[in-house]
Image: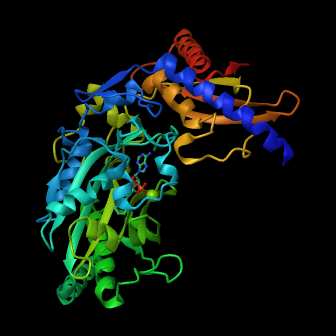
Amino acid sequence: MLKVARARPWRAACTQSLRTHKRHVHTPRTITVLGETYPTDDYTNLPPTIAALLERRLHVTPPHPLNTIRKLIASHFEGFKSYDNLPAVVTPELNFDSLGFPPDHPGRARGQSYYINRGVMLRTHTSAHEVDIYRETPRSGGWLCTADVYRRDEIDRSHYPAFHQTEGARLVNVADMDKLKAENEELRRGLSASRIIMEDCPDFDAITNPLQASHLPETVLPVAQNLRLRITTLFMSIFPPSTTPLHVRWTPDLFPWTSPSYQLEVRYRDGWLELLGCGIVLDDTIARSSHDPASERSWAFGMGLERIAMPLFGVPDIRLFWSRDERFWKQFRDGELRTFQEFSKYPPSERDVAFWLPVGVAKPHAASHAAGGEGVGWEENDLWDIIREVGGDLVEDVKLIDDFWHEAKGRRSLAVRITFRSMERSLERPEVNEVTDAIKAKLTERLAVEIR
Ligand code: FA5
Ligand code: MG
């Protein structure tokens, strides 16, 4: 206890100087994103490699599979208005506050999201546009919004710092519940005639997934059922009937602006792949959207398009969606589902990199990871970003393989295993060594680590 207390001022000083160092040496005064120039500040953490992805617009570029999926989804939601070109640069107010994220929500931290500066960031989800779009939506209207979203994340075959989501929402007048119940019956009949296996979950749980205080079961349960039925029938219609029936399961979830909330997973390659989150929008958010929570309910969902495209097109690695290689592009036709043929798989090459963290970085778990990174001298996502920035798409996977605290030195040591693999060619040993050396140099320069 005493040790932690004594260590604190020292750690704070070190954190400060590290941050000043990083900013002073590496952050330009301004950065330009999608043609707009912004001043930088102590929150800026958007690397050029990520900023470059904003130009790609894969979800509106035929014959890219994400464009095909976007259109398939839209065809299932007849009469819903589509928004496919909203810019990725948003304010934290839109991305978080408009949806009631608490001030200390971890998603707000610099370590989790990409900030251009304190006032502007890259959207982390399409929900950032919910309130604005609802405002333009008439009573009983529906809408869809598809876009690229950005999150600082680990690297593996199903996680990439940029991915795509389709958000959808439907407003329902509480006076229309009978109509909605009839629609639900129709949807249920369609489902029971299909080969889909659906594990449903309870509509709500009074403790862990409650109805909102102002919602009577009779004016909200049909809406919650309509949400799950519309989504399940969407997947029933876009996944072609095959010998193995599609197997999905609903479970309760938690979002700051919906209650009750649900998540949908699909059975894929011996595991469960998370496809989407959704729920009944809170009255507060409805009111913020210039609608009347007393007479209107709304469901909303946000689904990951790559997660749908991977099983649907048989794409084994999420990096492939960003490929510029014509062997990827020429396999697809606009609007058609085709099974991707892996181009010859080149061998992986692994390198381990071990290093001491800067003196003064606290023992793991002694530090609290406060939102906004205040007082935190070490942010693991900085590590993944730098490795990706230097190694680009040659980096297939990065794993933390060692993390120990050296009592006598009072220092923490980490080791990572980087798997390099090109989708396009065999990597030569000297090239891999050169990239590894460049990664080590950048880690030393930016994070003040000491390579072991
Ligand atoms: C959301 O982003 C919420 N905005 C969804 C929502 C909308 C809830 C409206 C309620 C109402 P979540 O963080 O679970 O939720 O992400 C939604 C989906 O995006 C996931 O289910 C997954 O399919 C996909 N996804 C999330 N992270 C990644 C990633 N790093 N790479 C690829 N896909 C991802
Ligand atoms: Mg989720």
Relative image position of residue 318 (x, y in whole percent)? 40, 40
Horizontally, residue 380 falls left or right of residue 322, namely right
Task: Give the farthest residue toward the top.
Answer: 430
Dividing the image into four quarters, tell me where ligand 1 lies: bottom left
Q: Which of 297 and 149 is in front in this view?
A: 297
Q: What residue is shown at x 41% (from left), y 37% (from top)?
A: 115
- 140 versus 241 height, above or below: below
Marker count (numbered): 0
Q: What residue is shown at x 20% (from left), y 55% (from top)?
A: 72
- 124 versus 427 height, above or below: below
User: In which quadrant of the rendered image does the C terminus lie?
Assistant: top right
- 242 versus 251 height, above or below: above
Relative image position of residue 348 (x, y in whole percent)? 54, 26
**The quarter of the displayed image where residue 328 is located:** top left
**The quarter of the displayed image where residue 37 is located:** top left
Relative image position of residue 197 (x, y in whole percent)? 39, 72
The color scheme shown is rainbow
Relative image position of residue 157 (x, y in whole percent)? 47, 40
